[in-house]
Image (tube, helix red, strand yellow):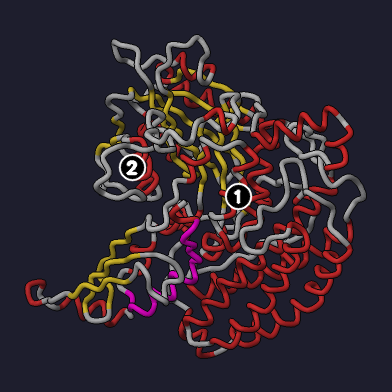
Amino acid sequence: MDSTTTDIDKVIPEEKQYSYLNLGPTHPATHGIFQNVLKMDGEIIVESEPTIGYIHRAFEKLAERRPYNQITPITDRLNYCSAPINNIGWHMTVEKLLNVEIPKRVQYLRVIIMELARITDHLICNAVIGVDTGALTGFVYMFQQRELVYEIYEEICGARLTTNIGRIGGFERDFSPKAWEKINKFMKEFPLVLKEFENLLSRNRIFMDRTIGCGGIKADRALNYSFTGPNLRAAGVDYDVRVAKPYSSYQDFDFTIPVGLNGDVYDRFMVRQEEMWQSLNIIKQAMDKLPEGPFHAEVPEFYLPPKEEVYNNMEALIYQFKIVMGETDVPKGEVYHCVEGGNGELGFYLISDGGRTPFRLHFRRPCYIFYQAYPEIIKGSMLSDAILTMSSMNVIAGELDA
Amino acid sequence: MADSQEEKLVSIIKEKFEDQVVLVEQLYDFLTITLKKDKIVEIIRFLYDNPETKFQFLTTITAIHYPHTNESRTVMGQASNIVVDTPAPEGKIALMYQLHNLYSNERVRLKIYLPESNPVVPTLTTVFSAANWMEREAYDFFGVIFEGHPNLKRILNVEDMVIFPMRKEYPLEDQTRDDKRDEMFGR
């Protein structure tokens, strides 16, 4: 690549002719709605101008009109590849505002769900890196495993992609024996498939030649661009919210944070791959240490009472009515809570003025923040590298556009 | 431990920018410092460079609109008492910067208040590249003008939009509709 860039520099500027290529908004290779107008010198990208907002759905405005429990479905649609992390992150934000003590069992169950979500997020990303380098096989196998996780979600909350999992205070019901059966099945089958997938790609000469040195970003630039998550860790910075500011009892588990060196496509792939192993490890520990106890905290103002209570108990009826109509007031306050989402630090900045809806809710969306480095990363690289860089950064349109 | 760290940080800021600090509060687990708007970029630059603070990671920037109300009920307690240098009482647009020191894992939130009619503030892109799109978002939704920003235009909304939709005077639903009355929805 170096030889080509020096060749360009030798040409006198007047003699250069650039062509413009409109990549997107809808293009099968961009995995979402992204538009990039690329200024090309042959096949080399000189400049790019990303346009975003094609699926902007005004979530922050919408949230100012909705009661707290109705905001959960909005968070589903941010990073839809790992919707449970968003849901649970939001629940924890409200719980922080309300100062609710969450039972240990709920925290562990949440960890299990969040790590399953992280696995699905990373496996899609890594499978798609495979597809973009020309290896479709791994993708098919990995998607079968994603299906297993979605069946687990289905058993727990009834939904698959946009899960709306859990409630403020805990879960809507305890995990059923069927759910545990499915989790156990996944825990038994997935490591074998993941190992097989890793064998296909991680030391594959063609894959390594294609990805090493492609789409790299140095740690200082990554930090200046406020990268978080696997993309930052691939550049060599070991920042992970699960360790830096443990939530939901992450401090109880023993796991390592993988880091890369060059921040290129290969490092991102390897970091995500190792994180999936670590997630499996965390789920296993959580299942082994799972304490007994209630599956939700005592927050009657927010947690729907069981139906038989509603018919027989005056208070439960009142709470049921107030929750369904969204009439519960919350304390005044200003709170920020962050969780380690599939792509990095997912933050919820919530200001409550004591009413039934938030006064202001801001989502710190990791995709939105690191995607602005994309023009800088792909500058001087080939068009096909740009495609690969985008898929390896795991830019999710829903999270980008909110 | 945590408390002394925060006290130390406040004293470092106060030492250099005594006249700029308006309010220091601990909101849940987050130290929040309200500052005057004039020297915000200098203060962030100072916190970035100072070896004792090293706030070299920008978590997020966002704006909040506090409309002017005649009601005695304050919208956000302290926030409505912050004096903005305009003659007539008017609404305020707050800008919130969240900084993170990755070495010591400290976080701080800096808030400034701008007058609603003329929200102008220097850009932070000179310190953090990440501020670029965050500021464009604040401009797009709240109309905050960032002086010196390299590319200050709308980012998520369509370019021919004329309003700043996140301001409180623009309600979410179409107000010309009369088939959706609030009382029917318990609002």
Amino acid type, residue under disc 1 in the picture: Pro
Q: Which mark is residue B140?
A: 2
The quadrant holding residue A177 is bottom right
Residue A345 x %, y %: 57, 51
Q: Residues within 10 Å of mark 2 (few under 14, many from 20)?
A: many
According to the image, label 1 marks what residue? A73
Classify residue A316 as left or right of residue A99: right
Q: Which residues are magenta?
A: A381-398
The answer to whether the residue labelled 2 contacts the one labelled 1, judged by CB atoms less than 8 Å apart, is no
Q: Label 1 lies in what chain?
A: A
Residue A137 x %, y %: 59, 88
Which residue sits at x=51%, y=77%? A129
Amino acid type, residue under disc 2 in the picture: Asp
Q: Label 2 lies in what chain?
A: B
Residue A28 x %, y %: 42, 76
Which residue sits at x=55%, y=27%? B183
* A130 or A402, nearer to the observer: A402
Magenta span contains residue A383: yes
The majority secondary structure of the magenta stretch comes to: helix
Say if A276 sits above or below B184 in the image: below
Q: Residue furthest bottom?
A: A205
Say if A317 sits above or below A394 in the image: above
